Amino acid sequence: MLQALIMLLLVAAGATALAVQGRYDAQRTAEDRSLAVAETFAHAPGTALALRSPHPAAQLQPATEQVRKGSGVDFVSVLDRRGVRITDTDPTLIGTKTGGVGRAVMGEMYTETFHGRPSDAVRAVVPVTDPGRRVVGVVTAGIKYSNVGQVLDRQLPMLLGMAAGALLLATGGAALVSRRLLRQTHGLGPAEMTRMYEHHDAVLHAVREGVLIVGGDGRVLLANDEARRLLDLPGDADQRHVRELRLGPGLAQLLLSGETASDEVVPAGDRLLAVNTRPTAPYGGAQGLVATFRDTTELRALTGQAEVARSRLSFLYEAGVRIGTTLGVRRTAEELTEVAVPRMADVVTVELLDSVLRGEEPSGAVREMRRTALRATRGGHPVQAVGEVIRFLAADTPMAAALRQGKAVLVPDLRCAGDWRAQDPEGARRALDDGLHSLITVPLRARGVVLGMVNFWRGAGSPRFEEEDVAVAEELVARAAVAVDNARRYSREHALAVTLQRNLLPLGLPDQAALEVASRYLPAESGVGGDWFDVIPLPGFRVALVVGDIVGHGLQAAVTMGRLRTAVLNFSSLDLAPDELLGHLDEMVTRLDTQTETAADDDQVPLTGATCLYAVYDPVGGHCTLSRAGHLAPAVVDPQGRVSFPELPLSPPLGVGGHPFEAGELELAEGSRLVLFTDGLIENRGRDVDEGLAMLSSAVADADLTPEETCRALVETMLPGHPSDDVALLVARTRLLDPACVATWDVPFDVEAVPRVRGEAARRLAEWGLEETAFGTELILSELLTNALRYGAPPVRVRLLLGRTLVCEVADGSNTSPRLRRAATTDEGGRGLFLVSRFADLWGTRYAARGKVIWAEQRLEGASEPDPLALLDVLGV
């Protein structure tokens, strides 16, 4: 097919070339004829004279027509020097101007292919000159382009016939040659033949496996280089009978049998050959056999060793997977014994330093260890039990030698060795009586420091340890040592983190009367985290509730939590509104994280992304103000047990910046419960937030639950044994201050109102049975109210609150805060706040949306009135 296509292309190319050549020859013939006619007419006698006559058209038109008809051209035209036709074959063109004759006017004659009116043509342009060689006109003669191709059209059938004949002859010849080649090559094409010879050479010279082809008569037809080497064949082995080659009776019989064999090992000289034989009849035509040979002499010798090595590698791989699955030191030691018994030894013991068991850095003294793990194939073993102290007192024991040398010590036969009996002869005797006969002792070392000791014992029915077993034991113990050291370091860090977090979290809930509070903190399975809570008493019997969450886990997260909790405590001492407090906290977080980035401390846990919920509850009326930064809203359980999640304004997490913080307001009935929590309580790998909130609602819906019972129910319902994230939980049940314990006066903005308010306050104190504190309270009220009226702004309000303490509050519309100072003896004022600080146990200022509140708090129990004379002394009066 390919040959026929090539022939077709060659014939087509030849025919095309002939057609192009024919067209070219026809055009050249037309140019020559046109030039001859034009030149003859231009040089004819009388042509130049006629052009000078008054009527050249009348004289030349008949002559041009006669020349056209007699010469075989399509047109003859005579032009003047301007290119205007004087005569033309087409009378309608006489008097019209033609282009492209400028060269002839200059005296040049030429031929060209003309395109334009009246038709495309091959024409000749010849100047007409007078006897003085001056051009007086131009003669053009030509043949239309359409008539030029008629010559080729007449020749084309003949060209195509010749091409078809040539194609038939070439195709027939190629078919005959191909048929003969196919018979000779058994149907293989050129590509197959080339590939077959390449494979033949590869088999003969490149393949590293012997190949031998034996004919049906037992003679060698082909042997490659590797077969000649393996069988030690002579150079003239081809066409010789197999029995003449001295291959050995077994191999010769196999080659002559014609039977199929697969990886049959046969001796050949000093080699062991793996032989494969297959008959050639189904594939090669004639009866015969092909055999392949592979030298397995060294492979057989290494097979046993490879199997042992594979088993040991498999054992070490399994050990790497099974040891260190937990971060417990004791459990890691137990995993080592579980892996080693019974595959490595019959009895395995692990001793560790007490400092390692405590998670501390290994001590320098290694003469005393504690047995931490023990495993044996059967009970009743003679070795010391777990928990006992193992001492290495005798310097000649294998254990002491291993510790001294820092590498494993092998005792192949304990019965013949005496040094290991030096420390405990009676224990050694019991071990021998029990059948223990071989020992490998390996120091447990990590980072160049001894952590403990591992002993491998083999008993009756097991072979003794060999040198190869020592390498396996050392590798096994080395892997276990890394796991033990990791567990030790984790235990130390975990203990530090837990201790630190316990000290950073509230050690106890503060004593206050506004809320009944219970709390829980549960660390994550992976260790402590950054969740925290706080309960902060505020002036006026108010209480702040805080819950927050730091990104990350571990010691750094606990430290970061402590920093943030301390900041909240400091900001709360300023008695800020919740949204304002979170605003200050957000600025602080941004500033601290900027400093952390500048310090480039990779271990520092970032503060940005931390969440916080800050709520302030006022028992006077049950009003609660809350603000949150990226934190979940609390659950509110009313006294009837209905659970709701109030829609509170949500601001971005701390450190994000760019957004103001907003506060939400709640009015809580007495006996309501506020449930504040972190996301670890409701969200885990098995459930999303919505499912968690539904479970929480179900767990706290019982109206009779106390805060402590609520915490217990939530932990039991919501949390698995080992939560994936740490959890902070705070439950508070509200109480209201008895309205009878609240007294409020709106005071006119006039200092003359001070005595009246002081008198009414004294009467209310008498009603409350607080006559003993009346003097101090009246003095505090007078000073604070006078300051508000003198330096503040309306409206002015006075409030007395009676609880565990007595609180006096004076509010006014000014934002100016008074400042405590010591007045000089000559000053007329400046002693009021000093007196307040002496009579009150606590006092301070808090700012409201409009104005400020100055408050003072007095203890009721154990309080005594200050000695007036002593006060006058202190004031310098």
Image (spheres, helix red, strand yellow):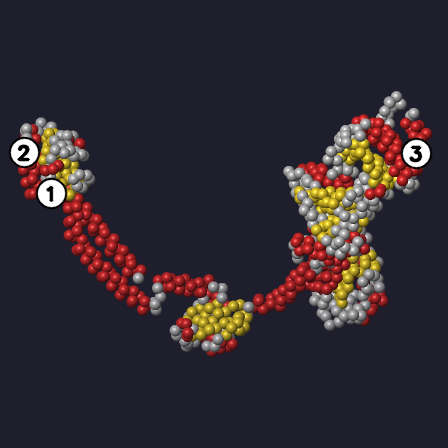
Residue 864: image location, x then y, percent = 93, 37
Residue reaching furthest to the top? 826
Q: Residue at x 84, y 36 (%)?
A: 808
Which amino acid type corresponds to the residue marked 3 in the rendered image? Pro
Q: Secondary structure at mark 1?
A: loop
Q: Is residue 834 left or right of residue 2?
A: right
Q: Which residue is mark 2?
A: 58
Q: Badge 1 local density, few (<14 within 10 Å), some, or many (20+)?
A: many
**Mark 2 vs mark 1: in front:** 2
Distance of label 3 from label 2 (alpha carbons): 156 Å
Q: What numbered label is drawn on residue 73?
A: 1
Judge depth for marks 3 and 1 and give the one in front. Answer: 3
Q: Could you tell me residue 437's position as x and y percent?
A: 76, 68
* Amino acid type, callout 1: Val
- The 10 Å Cα crowd at callout 3, few under 14, some 14 to 19, many 20 or more, is few
State whether residue 328 appears in this view: no
Q: Kindly report the distance in space between the C-alpha atoms of the residues bearing marks 3 and 1.
A: 149 Å
Q: Nearer the viewer, residue 238 or 426?
A: 426
**Horizontal side of residue 245 vs 33, given as left or right:** right
